[in-house]
C-alpha cells in the first residue's frame, strides 16, 4: 500500500484507512464484533492504519477501543475521531469521553465534526495539540454545499486535516477544494469514497473493462478507490464496511501503480456508462 505525506509534519500514512459510520455501531457482544475483528485485521495486514470515528456513530468508538486494545501492535494504528457538540465545556467532556471509549492516552487526529461550533472548539484543540494530547487538528463535512466553508476555515486557521466527501460518482471536490488543500499544505481525508454504495449499485452488474483487469483491478470497489488514490492531493481514503469479503476487495493493492492518464481513462469509462 502506498503512503502519503501529512504536509504539516512530514509524517507518512497509508492511503487506505477505515471509516466506522454505521458499520462499527454494533452491540458490544462477541458475535456482533467478530466480523469487525476480521475487517480490522484485513486492513492492518494490508498496511492500513487510519481508523476514523465520531461520538455521533453510536458504539463505534467503544468498539474500536475494545478491538484494538487486544492487538499487541495497537499503538501502530492512527486514531481519528471528532467533537460533535456545542460549547467549550461540553466539547471537552465529549472529547475526554472519546479518549476513554477508544482506550487512548493520545488521539492522533481530533476533528470538528461537520464544523459544529468550530470557532469554540478550535481553541481547545490548539491548546490540546500544544500539550501533546492530540497530534493533529481537523475539520469535516460530508456535503458538496459545505466545501467552500471548509476552505474558508482551513485558509484562516491552523488546520492539519480536512475531511470531505469525494468519489468518482461525486466530483465536486475536484473543482476547488482538492487544489486549495494541496496549495495550503492541508492533508485530505476522503469520506463517502464509494458513493455510499449507490454509485456502485448502478455498475455492479457490469463487467470490468479488460484494461482494468490487466492492471490488477479485480472489482468495481477497487476501481473506484483507485481513481481516488491516483489523485495526488488525496492523503487518505476511509471506506467503511463491516463485511470481511468487502474489506478484502477494498484493501487489495496492486503491485504497480498506473499513471494519471489511466485515471482519465477510468473517468471516461464511467461517464459513458
Image (cartoon, rainbow, N blue to C red):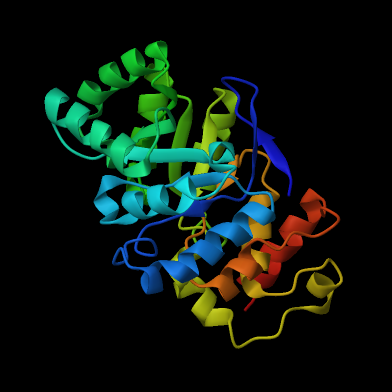
Identify which residue, 196 or 262, lies in the foreground. Answer: 196
Regarding residue 87, the answer to whether it shows in the image is no
Identify which residue, 200 or 106, lies in the foreground. Answer: 106
Residue ID at (55%, 41%): 77
Q: Position of residue 59 (x, y in %)?
A: 28, 56
Q: Is residue 70 above or below residue 197?
A: above
Name which quarter of the figure residue 28 lies in. Answer: bottom left
Q: Position of residue 273 (x, y in %)?
A: 62, 79
Q: Is residue 216 left or right of residue 50?
A: right
Name which quarter of the figure residue 157 lies in. Answer: top left
Regarding residue 44, the answer to whether it shows in the image is yes
Q: Is residue 263 above or below residue 101?
A: below
Q: Position of residue 270 (x, y in %)?
A: 63, 71
Q: Position of residue 33 (x, y in %)?
A: 41, 66
Residue ID at (62%, 61%): 42
Residue ID at (35%, 26%): 153
Amino acid at each position: 500500500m502506498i503512503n502519503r505525506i501529512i504536509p504539516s509534519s512530514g509524517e507518512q500514512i497509508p492511503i487506505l484507512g477505515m471509516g466506522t459510520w454505521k458499520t462499527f455501531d454494533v452491540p458490544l457482544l462477541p458475535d456482533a464484533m467478530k466480523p469487525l475483528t476480521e475487517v480490522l485485521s484485513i486492513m492492518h495486514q494490508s498496511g492500513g492504519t487510519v481508523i476514523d470515528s465520531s461520538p455521533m456513530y453510536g458504539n463505534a468508538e467503544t468498539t474500536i477501543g475494545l478491538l484494538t486494545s487486544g492487538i499487541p501492535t495497537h499503538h501502530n494504528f492512527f486514531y481519528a475521531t471528532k467533537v460533535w457538540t456545542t460549547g467549550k465545556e461540553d466539547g471537552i467532556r465529549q472529547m475526554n469521553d472519546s479518549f476513554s471509549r477508544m482506550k487512548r492516552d493520545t488521539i492522533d487526529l481530533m476533528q470538528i465534526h461537520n464544523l459544529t461550533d468550530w470557532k469554540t472548539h478550535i481553541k481547545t484543540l490548539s491548546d490540546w495539540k500544544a500539550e501533546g494530547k492530540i497530534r493533529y487538528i481537523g475539520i469535516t463535512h460530508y456535503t458538496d454545499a459545505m466545501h467552500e466553508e471548509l476552505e474558508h476555515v482551513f485558509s484562516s486557521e491552523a488546520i492539519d486535516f480536512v475531511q470531505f466527501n469525494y468519489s468518482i460518482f461525486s466530483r465536486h471536490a475536484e473543482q476547488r477544494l482538492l487544489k486549495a488543500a494541496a496549495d495550503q499544505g492541508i492533508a485530505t481525508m476522503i469520506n463517502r469514497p464509494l458513493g455510499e454504495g449507490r454509485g456502485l449499485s448502478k455498475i455492479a452488474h457490469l463487467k470490468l473493462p479488460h484494461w482494468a483487469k490487466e492492471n490488477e483491478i479485480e472489482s468495481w470497489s477497487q476501481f473506484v478507490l483507485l481513481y481516488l488514490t491516483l489523485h495526488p492531493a488525496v492523503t487518505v481514503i476511509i471506506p467503511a464496511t463491516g463485511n470481511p469479503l468487502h474489506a478484502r476487495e477494498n484493501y487489495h493493492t496492486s503491485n504497480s501503480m498506473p499513471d494519471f492518464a489511466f485515471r482519465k481513462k477510468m473517468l471516461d469509462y464511467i461517464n459513458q456508462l
